[in-house]
Image (cartoon, rainbow, N blue to C red):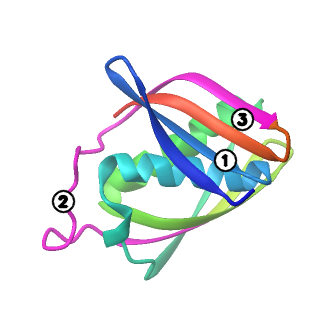
Amino acid sequence: MAPHWSHFEHEADIGVRGCGPTVETAFEQAALALTAVITDLENVADTHTISIQCQAPDIELLLVDWLNAIIYEMATRKWLFARFQVDIKDRRLQATAWGEAVDIARHAPAVEPKGATYTMLKVTQQHDEYCAQCVVDV
């Protein structure tokens, strides 16, 4: 299946889900879903790159560290992201993120990313795709 992301409702918070043929693409898509909570992805250009590294003892905690890193970059650098390339080996994640700084004229942030709380973490394999999902309170 082609990589894809989605949001799902969960009481007061919002769920983010990323799916793809590998764990890496599932993580990429989950990060896009998180970015889309903040702003419309159609308005984000992939003109600059940054590197992000994370590690954790299990795959669900690695997902938390990864999404925390995305929120950190959004909150401190005022960056928005258009795409990601993720490599995971031995619970270590190395990623390149493409995006741009917030341009008030083009971007209308829906929420201000200051930090996030994650619950209901799951990384599952379903037939020919992996899904990484959690509920996030930004």
Q: Which residue is mark 1?
A: 19
- Quadrant assignment for the C terminus: top left
Q: Is residue 26 magenta?
A: no
The reply, left or right, for residue 12 in relation to residue 118 is left
Label 2 vs 3, first from the N-terminus: 3
Q: Which residue is mark 3?
A: 56
Nearest-to-viewer mark from 2 and 3: 2
The answer to whether residue 16 of the structure is visible from this angle is: yes
Q: Which of 103/93 is in front? A: 103
Q: Are marks 3 and 1 in contact (CB under 8 Å)?
A: no
- Could you tell me the amino acid type at mark 3? Ala
Q: Which residue is mark 2?
A: 108
Give the residue displayed 36% in from the left and 25% down from the top. Answer: 13
Label 3 SS: loop
Label 1 SS: strand
| CA separation in Å, label 2 and label 1 | 26 Å
Residue 113 spot, x, y in % from top left: 30, 44
Nearest-to-viewer mark from 2 and 1: 1
Nearest-to-viewer mark from 3 and 1: 1
Residue 86 spot, x, y in % from top left: 69, 60
- Quadrant assignment for the N terminus: bottom right
- What range of the chain is rendered magenta? 96-125
- Could you tell me the amino acid type at mark 2? Ala
- Could you tell me the amino acid type at mark 1? Cys
Label 2 vs 1, first from the N-terminus: 1
| Residue sitting at the far bottom | 47
